[in-house]
Image: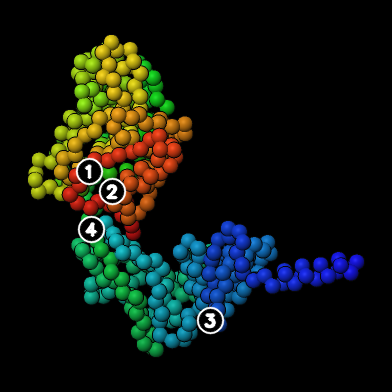
Amino acid sequence: MKHFLIFLALACTALITQPVFAFQGTVAADTIFLKSGGRKIAEITEVYPDVVKYRSGDSKNLVSLRVADITEIVYQNGSRDIFNPLNPGGKPEIRWMKNQVYSDKPEIRLNACVLNEAENIRVEVNGAANPVATRSFKTMPAQEEGCVGGTLVSPQIILNDGKNTVRLLASNDKGTGYSETWSIIFEKAKKRIALVVGNSGYQTGSKLQNPENDARAISQKLTGLGFDVIERIDASQGELRAAVAQFGSSVQSQDLEVALFYYAGHGMQIGGKNYLLPVDINPQTETELKVLAISADDILDQMAVADENSQRTNIMILDACRDNPLSRSWTRSSGSKGLAGMSAPPGTLITFSTKPGFTALDGEGKNSPYTSELLKALDVPGLRLEDIFRTVRIRVMELTNRQQIPMENSLLTREVVLHQPN
């Protein structure tokens, strides 16, 4: 019995010495800043006008804290609630709710919180001040507005080309308060166009599982990145030739930042040249295939830049190295799998889902390994074009145990970021 009591005492001592806010699980880390100067790391669960409830560490119990004791809460997603000014009764305090440093639109709406009594609130854009309409803060739910105890200000401003400076001003009988001055770059969104083709339902030979899914997913992603997308699924010879012609005309008739061609489906090389297969052809010889299929070089010619001063970037993405069973029945076979290497003209990036002479995996999931990783990389803001495909190559190599090694042939002449950070 004596030994049991000693063991129990030691166990209790060990529990008591554990830090109150130690995080041992995957609890979201919100930060509560106190008027006393301290702060708490916790998981905020409920916010009311007079009290905040939170859970610390891996505790299952909720703790209540008076709003009167809190200056602000910064949530794990970056948003914040401001409750009490640090200098109550003083001149206005102005805090931006979210920092924006880039815009591709001339008109944007900003959000700021003004604490303490304020009048004559105005926004100053490039040194010119204009009055701002204000609206009262809605007490609940606080997370939606993030300005508890203050006035939410949402001015809409018009930006000039290039760098703009923006700040807010507000006054009361104690003086004038100023926000932090922001620098916001405005660049008019340049036009981007893409032709996206996914051929799965081949009428002769093996059907493929994923090209349709791949093409639709890429189309949706590129649309979100500002591309005008021409999409073709299970394109016949006539449909594919017409789409390539339409794409070429659009590329040459507009001032574009980026022209992009994406193909998923069967592709072959003959005599060192690459051909993309429509779903309705049944060539019996290499000679027939050269006539019936679509030459990748012809598509590249459609994207060629006629004006030497053009700043357009061309991108060709070929997830088309999937083994084609047609060649097995030919009496005279090319003897080469996959696609051949292609030379990139100036201002062009050509990407292959695997290295020349090898075949790529169609994949057992919803998308091919290559396109699956490409979709993820396109989601990352700020990545340069070269970094996108380097990331894809590393991930595909890891996923396929180096059985599939994507490659690029690049002669880019300018830096391109498809997913601009805000």
Mark 4 is surrounded, within 10 Å at the Cα level, by few (under 14), some (14 to 19) or many (20 or more) other residues, namely some
Q: In this view, does 391 lie above or below 219?
A: below
Q: Are circles 1 and 3 on residues that touch, CB within 8 Å?
A: no
Looking at the rendered image, the disc whose residue lies closer to the viewer, 3 or 4, is: 3
- Name the mark on residue 410: 1
Please tell me which residue lies in front, 47 or 220: 220
Please tell me which residue lies in front, 389 or 404: 404
Secondary structure at numbered mark 4: loop
Looking at the rendered image, the disc whose residue lies closer to the viewer, 4 or 1, is: 1
Amino acid under disc 3: Gly
Q: Is residue 238 left or right of residue 34?
A: left
Q: Distance between the residues labelled 2 and 1?
A: 9 Å
Q: Residue furthest top?
A: 331
Q: How far apart are marks 1 and 3 (CA)?
A: 55 Å
Say which residue label 3 marks: 37
Q: Are circles 2 and 1 on residues that touch, CB within 8 Å?
A: yes
Amino acid under disc 2: Glu
Sequence order check: which comes first, mark 3 or mark 4? 3
Residue at 36% across / 66% down in the picture? 99
x and y percentages locating residue 84 in the rendered image: 50, 78
Mark 1 is surrounded, within 10 Å at the Cα level, by few (under 14), some (14 to 19) or many (20 or more) other residues, namely some
Looking at the rendered image, the disc whose residue lies closer to the viewer, 1 or 3, is: 1
Sequence order check: which comes first, mark 1 or mark 3? 3
Q: In this view, does 322 lie to the left or right of 72?
A: left
Say which residue label 4 marks: 187
Q: How far apart are marks 2 and 4 (CA)?
A: 22 Å
Amino acid under disc 1: Ser
x and y percentages locating residue 120 in the rendered image: 34, 79
Sequence order check: which comes first, mark 2 or mark 3? 3
Looking at the rendered image, the disc whose residue lies closer to the viewer, 2 or 3, is: 2
Secondary structure at numbered mark 1: strand
Say which residue label 2 marks: 386
